[in-house]
Each structure stands twice: as C-alpha cells, then as structure tokens.
Image: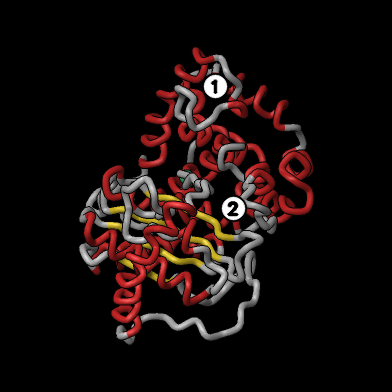
Amino acid sequence: MWLRYSFENKMDSIMKKYQIYILAILIAFAVSCSNSTEPKYTEAFTDTWGEITSDNPKTFAASDVSQATIDLTLKWLKTASDAWGNYGPLEIWFVGDSHDATIELDNLWCNTRQQIDPKWNTEWDCANGDPYGSGSGWSPFYRYVDDGGAAVATYRRDYFDYYFLTITMSAKYPSPSETDYIPVTMHEYFHVYQHSHIMDIEQNGDKTPREMKNGGSQKPWFSEGGAEYMAQLLYSKQDGVESGYLKERMTRKFDSVSDYKSHGVRLDALTYDSPVSTYDVGAWFIAYLIHNEGEETFRVDFYKDLNDLGFEGSFLKHFGKSTNEYVDAFDLFLDTGLEEALIIIP
Ligand SMILES: [Zn+2]
C-alpha cells in the first residue's frame, strides 16, 4: 500500500491556528523529552540511504498499542531484514484504534521531526492538533485509525536535511492476532528494500522519478506484486507454516485472473483504481518471473541495477525481454489455467 502525500499548501488557515496549537506542541515536546528512552538525534546527518545498516528500526507507538504488538512486528521485520538486508534509517509508527492516542502520536511525530530536522515544515507536514479539520497540515496517521492497513513512506526530499523511511502499522485489518499480519509486515519491509535501491531525491514534491522505478502510482503491478509475492514466499518458508501454504494463497489470488482478463487492460497499465486486484495478478507475475529467472536475479540483480539503468533498462538486462514481451508471455501463461499455473509455486 502506498501512502499518498498531499502537498496542498494550506498556509493561510494554518497560520491562524498555529499559535493556538504551539502550546499543545510545547507541552507534548516537554513530555517526550522527559522520557529517557526517547532517541536523541545529536549526530550530524549523513546520507546512508541504500546502505546496509546494523541499526535497528526506531519504534514509536500510540499509547493504546500493546508491547506484544510491537514485539511481534519487530520479530517479523527482523526475519525480513535478515533475509533481504537491513536498510534504513527506518522508523516504525504504530497506530491503535483510539483517536485521542493518535492525536498524541501525531504530536510525537511532529516533535520528533523538528528535533531531527530543523527544516521540517510544520505548516505542511504536521497536523497541528487538528487531525480531521480541513484547515490543518498533513498527518500520516489518522486515516489508519478508521481504515486500518499498513504503508511505507519515503522521506527523501530536496527540502529535508534527514532522509528516512517509515512503516506505519495499524492494529486493524489485519489485526496482530490474525496470521495475515505477519506477511503484511514483510510486504511492507519489501517496499523498504525496493525504495532503498532508488537514490532519486524528490524535487518540489515530485515523486514521479522514484515511482517510474518502483511503483507508487506508476508501477503498482511490479512493486505491489513483488512485495506481496516475496512476503508470502518468505513466510511460507518459516518454521511451523504448513507446507501447502503458498499454493493455497496463490490459488486465492488466481481468483483475480478472470477479473483481469475481462477488464482487458494490460497488467502494466493497471492502477490502484483498476477494478482488478493489481496485488493478486502482480504477485502471480512475480511468481512467474522468479520461476523463469530465479529469485536472486529478481531480488538482487534487478534491484542492484535499477537506479542506474532505470526500470526498463534493468528489466531488459536481467530478464532478457522488455516488459511488453514479458507481460505478453505472462498472459499466455495465465491462459493455461490454475492447475498448470500452480506447478510453478514452491
Ligand atoms: Zn504494498
């Protein structure tokens, strides 16, 4: 899932409200400073984007999120980073189901940002205590209280002095008590992996150069398909997961193939709004790609060259076909039906 980011400039109304909320922010700041476990960011900023790090992700949680949820999430994120490499700087933000706790979390977000990066724009990028009001800045968290889900966001922008990624996890859809929570955690980490291989810095809020290489609104079939299949594949290899797990998951995802065929739009032209699960059909595409080319070729070689060669360049170099040709071959593969298709699933 990709977090959409609005750059609407709402400065006029913000400036009116800002003075009212600064007191609340200062109080929250004092509270957060009094917490001895609060990370301190005194070191000079160095750009470590795309490098393997030994640092653990930093975690921030709303007060209604349990330690068990945090521990569970970190455990499976570690499984993913052990498998794919530990990238960062990464922050994990946990949203629960209390609106008030989320407002506190947003204050913590805004204070943390200002503490790390004096250039952080509090007018645009802090909700300023008005999470649902139309006149405030932008908060990354409130929609998750009601809608659930999880997302990765990249903060590699020309107007920042500190580059980082976030994973936002909500306690809803799926809840930590559901098995699905685990592959969702790994799915999000694969997005971190993908983005760590793209060095473009957003200029004036323009995500397009990054998204042309990895998903967002440009290539969800590949980025979501990759995150989904890699997460399910990795989870299927864990101790205690039944042997037929991956085939069962991919059988369910094959249900979307008939929608895809009747929709009549090519896989690489599907968007988040298409009436087809781009995640499901995309996951089948990555399964097909990995079956043909090998997991290392996809995960390591393709992503290693992605930044320098671009999406089509690295695709052609490592998979030997253009995306057009590969999608054509994939469409024929789907026509063989579920039973034949399942043969390629380990
Ligand atoms: Zn995703």
Tally of marks:
2
The quadrant the N terminus occupies is top left
Choose between 162 and 11: the one closer to the eye: 11
Q: Amino acid at mark 1?
A: Leu
User: What residue appears at the point 48 percent right and 41 percent down from the top-left corner?
Assistant: 346
| Mark closer to the observer (1, 2) | 2
Which secondary structure lies at badge 1? helix
Residue 69: x %, y % from top left: 26, 62
Query: Mark 1 CB in 8 Å range of ligand 1?
Result: no
Residue 343 visible? The answer is no
Work out whether residue 132 or residue 22 is closer to the camera in this orientation and state it.
22
**Left or right position of 317 against 135:** right
Q: Position of residue 97 (x, y in %)?
A: 22, 53
Residue position marked by numbered label 2 in the rendering: 194
Whether residue 32 sits left or right of residue 88 in the image: it is left
Amino acid carrying label 2: it is Gln
Q: What residue is pinned by disc 1?
A: 334
Asked which quadrant contains residue 249, the reply is: top left
Image coordinates for residue 162, horizontal then vertical, percent = 58, 70
| In the image: residue 63, left or right of residue 219 | left
Q: Position of residue 150 (x, y in %)?
A: 38, 50
Label 2 element class:
helix
Query: Closer to the N terminus: mark 1 or mark 2?
Result: 2
Q: CA distance from mark 1 to mark 2?
A: 26 Å
Residue 77 sits in quarter: bottom left
Q: Decide if residue 7 is on the left or right side of residue 16.
A: right
Instruction: Name the residue nearer the viewer: 224 or 5.
Output: 5
Q: Residue at x 61, y 70 (%)?
A: 161
